[in-house]
Structure formats: structure tokens, C-alpha cells
Image (cartoon, grey):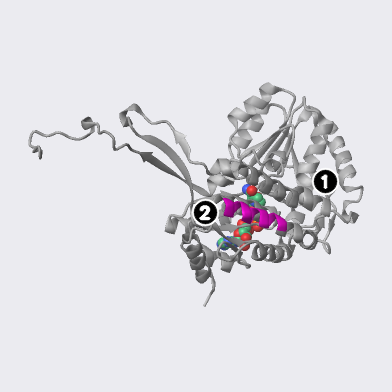
Amino acid sequence: MSSIPLLVNHQRDFFASGKTRPLGARLDRLKALRETIRKFEQPLLDALKQDLNKSEFEAYATEIGLVYKEISHTLKQLRRWMKPKRIRTPLTHWGSKSYVIPEPYGVTLIIAPWNYPAQLALVPLIGAVAAGNTVVLKPSELAPHVSEVLATILEEAFEPGWATTVLGGVEESTELLAQNLDYIFFTGSVAVGRIVMTAAAKQLTPVTLELGGKSPCIVHNDANLKLAARRIAFGKYTNAGQTCVAPDYVYVHREVKQAFVAHLKQAVEEMFGVEPLLNPDYVHIISGKHYERLASFLSDGRALIGGMTDLAQRAIAPTVLEGIDWNSPVMQEEIFGPVLPLLEYGDIEEVIAAVSARPKPLALYLFSESRELQQQVVDRVSFGGGCMNDTLMHFGSPYLPIGGVGESGIGRYHGESSFFTFSHQKSLLLQTTLFDIPFRYPTSRWGRKLV
Ligand code: NAD
């Protein structure tokens, strides 16, 4: 018999014991988690190298550093977030007081993807524990070394009733989703997001879905092209493009295309070398299947930059493609790799129309010096979140909520948003017994006065 139902029941009992609720206990667990991550930092860095060829610099900057930042932010703010919030009471309710009280849901399930296998598992976990829940974490089977280290970290930092890991893939996820859970937090593809939400609907379990999609990046003719090129190269080729909020494609103004490409070439060479496939720190593609899919896009257009591949290492050089339109295969799905198609435009209206005609993206980036243009794009295009004159950096702030809209996701997290995502907002009215207001009760001429 599978151990999953037993595990979930055990967590349910543990939650019912009340041990996850006191502020002090939550803070202790988060500190223990931080200490345990510190202890296993080297094995975690080694595992990230093994699974994705992430360099220590990149692993620290985009995974472990982010986790430490999230823990310290949460430790500082948790007392404030947990406080019942006194809110207004209408005059009709004279004599009473109103509060909203954050309450943990209970047993939560976190399903994580492989692309940032440490932080996309641990950052939601921090929110779930801070909010007083128990957690079953299901990391990705495609990053098996990181998943093993995560299991060890959780085992050392928590009792299994509080937080534990279930290793495995679709089979284990499916069984977990069939349990009676109180909250499901899923990060992954749109297709699996639909499966998760369908399973959750059967038990009316609330969900957060952190999904993906094609995130546009717009370079206008008044942009600082050198900076734009550097920041786009960073956003697109970090983790070899396997980033949910990476710019999927660039819409560049026709007048500046040539100059922008020249700067982009220079930026790529500065960051990844003239021969990126020989760079020992350049991230590899996670699996043979994804490698084949990405390599097939290379023939969709002409490579202005890159285009080289290495099957043995599953590596694809940072690539920029021209001669692409919306009918090209590379524009039919989220790329999730180091291939950057360039589309040209002359009028921003074309861009607004093309982006708005498609599923709402997770992120949008605009490079322009014009506040007016920035405002126009923000007002008229719906997207999860993004940056003006930068890429990815909104994801690194514990103060900004992260989440999609439409097909790119439901709900948001990071910092305070994580805490409230994993908390039910319980409304409470405290009524006085010192007096009563008679007008609220029905009066009937058939009513009988008892006294
Ligand atoms: P995925 O959807 O294939 O897998 C994610 C998780 O779901 C894994 O743990 C996997 O084991 C599990 N899973 C897979 N099939 C399942 C099924 N049929 N039933 C239940 N569970 C199943 O996604 P991925 O390939 O790991 O990650 C890439 C996708 O994730 C991209 O679309 C990317 O944009 C998205 N993503 C989004 C964010 C975000 O913050 N919004 C972050 C990272 C990745």
C-alpha cells in the first residue's frame, strides 16, 4: 500500500495538535530551515551543477541567495502579518468590533518544477510554514540530485508531520492530488496546471498556479540600447533561458534593430564568452526531449547570434533568430531555452495588438525612456508582472507579489503575499452584550410579548 495517504493523515493529525500555530514555533522552524540549508549548501550547489550545470555564482544569485533573503524577510515581518487586523464597523453594527484574522489552511501540497529546483520549492515552503501550515513538498523528478538534497534538508529541519518531501513524478503527483488537501501550490506548465486545477476542483481545494507562457520584451527606438542589450542577454540566457519570467521573444523597433543586435552580440560575448559551448559555467538543457525541441527551432529563422549546439552536453549557445513571424513554430509555444526570436515593429500599436490577441503573459518588459509609452503599455496590456528597462529583477524582490494572470497563472506569492496566499482570512465580529438594538428584529402584530 502506498504511504501517501498515511503521510497526509499524519500531517492532518499533526496540524490538529496545534504545534504549527504559535509564532515562536514558526520562527524556530524557519531558523532551523535556514541553518539546515547553510549546512547543506555545498551539496545543494553540487546538485545544481549536476542537474543543470549551474555555476556556484549563478546558483547563489538565482536560487540560494533568494531563499535566504525570503527567510530573513519573513522572520522580520511575521509577527506583524499574523496580527488580527482591526477593520471598520458600520454604524448599523453599533457596539461591535470587526477583525480579520489570518488562519492556516492545514495540510498543503507544493509541487515544484525543475528549472530553479531549489528556490521554486523552498520559497513557497517558507510561506506555507510562516502561515502555520504543514507541507508535503513534491520536487521535480527532472532535477533528481537537487530533489534528494531537498529531502535531506526537510528531514533535518522538520518533523515529518510538519513538512516532508515526496520524491517522484506524475504517478506520485497524481496520487497526492487525489488526497484530501487544504491548499495546493503548483509551479509548472500551463498543461499540468489544468490537471492540477481539475483535481483540486473535485474536493474544492483552493489553488495557486504559477504557470508560464510567452513573455514579450519590447525595445523601443528611444531605448538605451546598450543597457537594454545587457539586461535582455542576462534575462534570456541566465539558466540557458529556462526561466519562467525570461523574455520569450523581443519586439524591436525597426529603426534600432541593427544597433540593438550589435550591442546584444557584445553583451552575450561579455557574459558567456565568444564560444559559450566551451564555457564550463554555461547552463545545460535539462533533458534530451527539451534539447531536441529547442534545437528544432534553430531552423525556423536565420541565426544572427549563436545557433551552435552540443548534443553530448545538451547545450545550445545563446541564439538570436531573425526572419520569424507569428506563424513560425518557435512562436507557437513557450520557448523555455536560449533561443530568442526577433520580431520588428514600426508602431507600438502593432505590438499592443499582437500581445493582447494572445494569452496574457506571465511577464512583460519594455525598454524605453518615455514615461508616456511605459504608462500606455502598462495600462493597455494585461500581464502578470514585469519591469520597465530591466528583466527578471521584479522576481528577486520579497516586496513584489509574483504571479500570472489568465493562462499564466492564478494567485501570487513572495514575502507578505506568500503568507496571505497560505492563510485563510477569517472575518470576525465581536458583539457587545451590554445593550441590544431592537430595530434589527422582525416585529409582527401576531408576535406575542412573552414578558
Ligand atoms: P511541468 O508542468 O512539466 O512539471 C511541474 C511539476 O508537475 C513537476 O513536479 C512534475 O513532476 C509535476 N507533474 C508533471 N506532470 C504531471 C501530471 N500529469 N500530474 C501531476 N503532476 C505532474 O513543468 P516543468 O517542465 O517542470 O517546468 C516548466 C514550466 O513551468 C514552464 O512552463 C514554466 O514557465 C513554468 N514555470 C513557472 C514559474 C512561475 O513562477 N510562474 C516558475 C518556473 C516554471
Q: Toward the viewer: 228 or 7?
A: 7
The residue lying toward the viewer, choosing from 207 and 32, is 32
> Magenta stretch: dominant SS?
helix
The reply to whether the residue tagged 1 has its Cβ within 8 angstroms of ligand 1 is no
Q: Which mark is residue 21?
A: 2
Specify whether residue 32 is painted magenta.
yes
Secondary structure of residue under mark 1: strand
Q: State left or right for residue 380 relative to residue 203.
A: right
Amino acid, disc 2? Arg
Residue at 81 percent of width and 58 percent of height: 53
Residue 265 percent across, percent down from the top left: 87, 40
* Residue 32 coordinates in the image, percent (x, y): 67, 57
In the image, 314: left or right of 138? right
Q: Quadrant of ligand 1?
A: bottom right
Magenta stretch, residue numbers: 24-35
Asked whether the beta carbons under mark 2 and mark 1 sit within 8 Å of each other, the answer is no
The residue under the point 83% across, 50% down is 57
Q: Quadrant of residue 415?
A: top right
